[in-house]
Amino acid sequence: MSDWSVEFYSDGDDNSPVLDWYQTLDDKTKAKLLWTFQLLEANGIDVGMPYVKPLEDKLYEVRAEVNRNAIRVIYFLYTGRRFILLHGFQKKTQKTPKKELEKARTYLEDFLARNADSVDEPLS
C-alpha cells in the first residue's frame, strides 16, 4: 500500500472542475489517465517522463496520448504525500497554453488559501 494519494481539486463549494472535465472523457482516455494516477500513488515522485513532466512554479502535468490526442492534467504536490489534480485539457499546441497554466494557478492559489490554517505546504 502506498503512502501517496491523488486527489481532485475542489473549491469551497465542493465543485471540482477537473473532476467534471474528467467525467466527460471517453472510457479509453479515462482508463489511461486512471492508470497514470495509480502509477503516481504507487511510486510517488519517482514517476517521470513520459508519464509526468515538470512545468513551472511547483506545477507538473500528467501526460497521456489517446488516439493521437494529447491529454494533460496539471497538478501539484502537497505535503502529506498528496498529488492535487488542478486542471485538465486536451493539448493542441507544442507548448502548454498560458490560459491553461493560469487556470491551474488560480485553482492552486484557491486551494492554498483555503488550506492556510493547516501546517501543510506545497512541495517544490
Image (tube, rainbow, N blue to C red):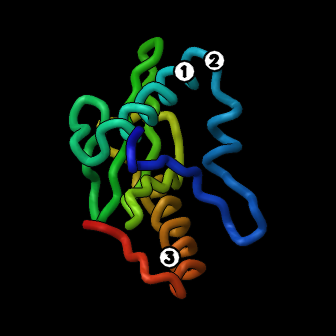
Looking at the image, do the residues carrying marks 3 and 2 touch, with CB atoms under 8 Å apart? Answer: no
- Neighbourhood count class around disc 1 (C-alpha, 10 Å): few under 14, some 14–19, many 20 upward: few
Q: Amino acid at mark 1?
A: Ala
Amino acid residing under circle 2: Asp
Identify the residue under disc 1. Answer: 31
Q: Find the distance from the CA under tag 1 to the CA under tag 2.
A: 6 Å
Image quadrant occupied by the N terminus: top left
Coordinates of residue 97 in the picture (x, y in percent): 40, 49
The number of numbered discs placed on residues in the rendered structure image is: 3
- 113 relative position to 13: left or right: left
Outermost residue, right side = 13
Rate crowding at label 2 as few (under 14), some (14 to 19) or many (20 or more) other CA atoms within 10 Å: few
Which circle marks residue 87 in the picture?
none
On the image, the x and y values in percent for residue 76 come to 39, 58
Q: Residue at x 55, y 71 (%)?
A: 111
Give the Cα separation between the discs numbered 1 and 3. Answer: 29 Å
The residue that appears at 52% across and 60% down in the rendered structure is 103
CB of mark 1 within 8 Å of CB of mark 2? yes
Residue 67 location in percent, x, y? 47, 12
Seen from the viewer's position, the closer of residues 95 and 73 is 73
Can you tell which quarter of the image residue 10 is in? Answer: bottom right
Report the side of 75 relative to 57 (left or right): right
Q: CA distance from mark 3 to mark 2?
A: 32 Å
Q: Earlier in the sequence, mark 1 or mark 3?
A: 1
Mark 3: secondary structure: helix
The kind of residue on which mark 3 rests is Leu
Residue tagged 3: 112
Choose between 116 and 74: the one closer to the eye: 116
Nearer the observer, 92 or 34: 34
Few, some or many residues within 10 Å of mark 3 (<14, 14–19, 20+): some
Q: Disc 2 marks which residue?
A: 27
Can you name the residue that lies furthest to the top here? 67
